[in-house]
Image (cartoon, rainbow, N blue to C red):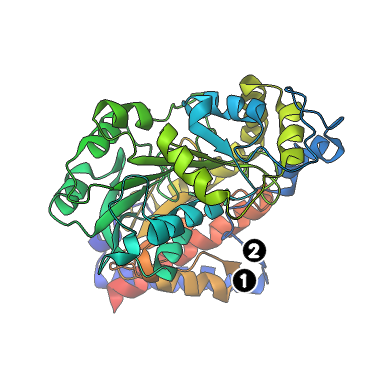
Amino acid sequence: MSSSELSALSPADLTTFVATQRTAYDALKAKELKLDLTRGKPSAAQLDLSEELLSLPNGHTSAAGTDVRNYGGLEGLPELREIFAELLGVEPSQIIAGGNASLTLMSNTLINALLHGAVDSERPWSQEETIKFVCPVPGYDRHFALLESLGIEMVTVPMTDDGPDPVATAALVKDDPSIKGMWIVPTYANPAGSVCTQEVAAALTSMPTAAPDFKIFWDNAYALHHLTAAETKSADVLSLATAAGNPHRPVIFASTSKITFAGSGVAFLAGSVDTIAWYLKHLSKSSIGPDKVNHLRHVQFFKDAAGVRAHMDKHRAIIAPKFAEVQRALTDGLEGRGIAEWTKPAGGYFVSLDVLDGTASRVVELAKGVGVALTPAGASFPHGDDPRDRNIRLAPTMPPLSEVAAAMEVVVTCVLLAAGEKLTS
Ligand code: PLP
């Protein structure tokens, strides 16, 4: 079959095309596959890179001489904060090290803003009749689920190659005081893979907002997760916001979930010194101190920021071939057909695939029918509702390379078959 646009085929050729794809699909069924491209998790080989952590720390004393086994040090071990301050481009006084999940820090920040007001709020957010967040789409499903669970409404803006659409965002927030914040995954976004440029970050940190306490939830989960030798730098959101006179606007989140152990890493929150004080004030009511033993073993494991970077190179060696396989399969199978577009990320954990409008759910259904689990269509949109039913998030890190290849053969066949069905219906 030549790589021509499907829409250019005659009705007869299109019917033949669908029959060919159905035969290919039935052949896949006979293979009785059981594959999974849904999970944005590190593979066992990646987790093995951090195995040494299980025999650390050596001793139990921090650089300042504190016994890490005991209570205290709510802001986290200074030497670990220093390493990640450097990596995330903030001052050590602007970052705290917490528990194992940045999602918990995001949730706590929202809940504290609702119950007590943010650091610069006139009153608790919960006293407003309606609260809304700007959500760039496609985006991270758990961000949306968290907002939904707290009764925060979501308004969407397009995610562009340079980050959230700054013009659409500015237009929304300038007159609507109920819009209290927005999400950004600035570097190698989930799932779009895009990187928020310094220019877009400057626009978003300086734009006038009707809400005086507007927040940018800057979730830099993939700041260090490069797939190429080029170590793309994240925009310096805190300096930009401070220069624009909005120092408390960004709240930065990150973690080592996809650096060391996804279940036993360390999460970080960064922001203005006042934001940190605000967060710690509320945290002090629910915790006497974080898991500093975990902090210390991470310090001993990495030693310094260069140690983290070197460690990330080892991750890259494991996962880059999987991303290359996804690109190869999509290019070989779908390029030039006029029925699909996909991202070519230079980092992160996902490839975002846009298929023919109205066929994403069908593709996922077809893939399931031959034993390949794909992330539910619409997952990257608030309430799971992709208005064009076209986006599918592919997550190739977890399965071994051979399984990624087998699953991608299925994806390509299902995209072709679903498109053919649609065009002949
Ligand atoms: N933020 C983004 C954008 C993610 O993709 C993920 C995990 O997939 C998380 C946060 C979760 O981070 P953590 O494990 O630190 O809670």
Kind of residue at badge 2: Leu
Depth check: 254 or 113 in front?
113
Which residue position holds label 1?
371
Judged left or right of residue 177, residue 227 is right
Depth check: 281 or 214 in front?
281
Neighbours of disc 2 within 10 Å: few (<14), some (14-19), many (20+): many
Place residue 153 in its image quadrant: bottom left
Check mark 1 vs ligand 1: CB closer than 8 Å? yes or no: no
Q: Residue at x 59, y 25 (%)?
A: 82
Report x, y in % for residue 265: 67, 44
Mark seen at residue 291: none
Are the two marked residues, 2 and 1, in contact with CB atoms closer than 8 angstroms?
A: yes
**Spatial distance from mark 2 to mark 1, Cα to Cα?**
6 Å
Q: Quadrant of the N terminus?
A: bottom left
Place residue 51 in its image quadrant: top right
Q: Is residue 293 in view from this perspective?
A: yes
Judged left or right of residue 43, residue 163 is left
**Helix, strand or loop at mark 2:** strand
N-terminal-most mark, 2 or 1: 2
